[in-house]
Image: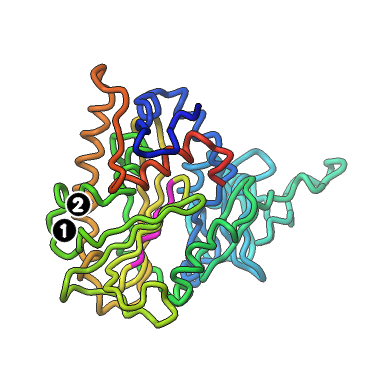
Amino acid sequence: MPLIDPDIRKAETLPSRFYTDSATFEQVRSGFSGNWHFAAHLSQLEEFNVIPLQHLEGLLREPLLLTKGEHTRCISNVCTHRGMLVANEPCKTSVLQCPYHGRTFGLDGSFRNMPEFEQVEGFPSAADDLTEFPVAEWRGLLFSTLDGTDCERWLAPLAERIGWMPVADFKHDPSRDREYEIDANWALYVDNYLEGFHIPFVHGDLHDVLDYDGYRTELFDGGVLQVGRAREGEPCFELPESSPDYGENVAAYYYWLFPGLMLNFYPWGLSVNVVVPISVERTKIVYHGYVWDSSKLGQGAGGDLDKVEAEDQFVVEATQRGVNSRAYERGRYSPTRETGVHHFHRLLTRPDDSN
C-alpha cells in the first residue's frame, strides 16, 4: 500500500516526520543527485564566463562550476591537488587557477600546470583533470545533474506549453536576485507553492489581480503547472494563436519541477526560485530574475514578489511550528485545490518516479 493513496479523495498528507525528522530529511535529500537542477541562464555568462554554482553545492553537497569557453560546461570546483575550491566568485578568465597552490586548468577542466611537481612520478594523469558533469540547455536556461538522464523528457511540458516564449532572449537582472533563509523544512515551502488555495487568505494584493475561480493546476510527469488567470483589465500575456491558452487572459505560468525548482513566467519575464534544503528545519530560497519586457515590471501577478515571498514565509514558518506538535500527524487534501501538493507527495515517497 503506497504511503500516499493515488486517489486524492482517500489520501492523507505526508506524515509529520517528513518535515521534522533528521534521518528522513537526509534520506530524501540523498536522492537529489539523480535529478536535474537549474544552473543559470546563458545571459549570466556574458559578463562572467566562470560561475561557481553555490546553490547547487547546497542542494547536492557537491561544489560545481559553470564555465563558458568553446562550449558551456559544468565541472567540479574542487582542485585535484588538495581539495581547495578552484573559484569562489564569478570571474572572466581563460584559465582556472587554484588560489591555494597555483594548479591550473583549462575551462574544460583539463589539467594544465602545477609548480614544484617536476619530480612526481606518473604525473599528470586523467585523475588530475576536473570531473565534468552533464549540462543541458533549453531556450537559454542551463541545467545540470550528477547522475540524472533524459533532461529533454523532464522539460518537454515547458516546450509544449510555452515554446513560443523567447526565453533565450531574456536578460539577467541582478537587482532582482534574492536569497532568503527560513526556519522551515524545504518540503513545506514546496507544499505552499503548489496550491493557490491559500491566495485569498494570505495574499490580498495578489488575489486582487488574479481570477481565483479561473486558477487551475495541471499535473505532469515530474512536475506541476499552475496557470494564473488575470482579472479583467489586469496585465496578461499576449498569447500567439499557436498557444494552447490562446484567447485566455493568462497572468502567470507557475512551473514546479521536482524536487525544488520553480519557474515563474510573467509578462515581464522570468523569476526562478531554487529551494535549497539546509537542515530538516532550515531552508534557503534563491531567486534569480530574467527580464523580457522591462515596461511591464511592477505590474500584475509578478508585480511585488518580495511582498508575496514575505507572506509565504510567515505561513510556512508557522506551519513548521505546527507540524512539530504532538497533536498533529497527517491531514487530508482538497480534491479541487490541492492536486499539486498530492502529486508532489506521491513523487517524494516514490523516488523512482521523480526523475
Q: Where residue 279 sits: x, y (%)?
A: 40, 31
- Answer with the quarter of the image where residue 31 lies: top right
The answer to whether the residues at label 2 and label 1 have Cβ atoms under 8 Å apart is yes
Q: Where residue 61 sits: x, y (%)?
A: 53, 39
Q: Is residue 275 above or below residue 317?
A: below
Q: Residue at x 54, y 63 (%)?
A: 156
Q: Which mark is residue 199?
A: 2
Mark 2 lies on a secondary structure that is: helix
Q: Is residue 60 above or below residue 267?
A: above
- Position of 206 with respect to 245 (left or right) is left
Q: Nearer the N terminus, badge 2 or badge 1?
A: 2
Name the residue furthest top: 326
Q: Which residues are magenta?
A: 260-265
Q: Where residue 214 sits: x, y (%)?
A: 24, 62
| Residue placed most toward the observer, 29 or 82 | 29
| Residue placed most toward the observer, 71 or 295 | 295
* Residue kind at label 1, given as amino acid type: His
Q: Where residue 257 sits: x, y (%)?
A: 46, 52
Q: Residue at x 53, y 60 (%)?
A: 155
From the image, tell me which residue sits under label 1: 207
Instruction: Give how far apart the Cα atoms at labels 2 and 1 are.
Output: 6 Å
Magenta highlight on residue 39: no
Q: Residue at x 87, y 43 (%)?
A: 122
- Position of 161 with respect to 270 (left or right) is right
Name the residue furthest right: 122
- Answer with the quarter of the image where residue 50 lies: bottom right
Local packing at callout 1 (Cα closer than 10 Å; few below 14, some 14-19, many 20+) is some
* Residue kind at label 2, given as amino acid type: Ile
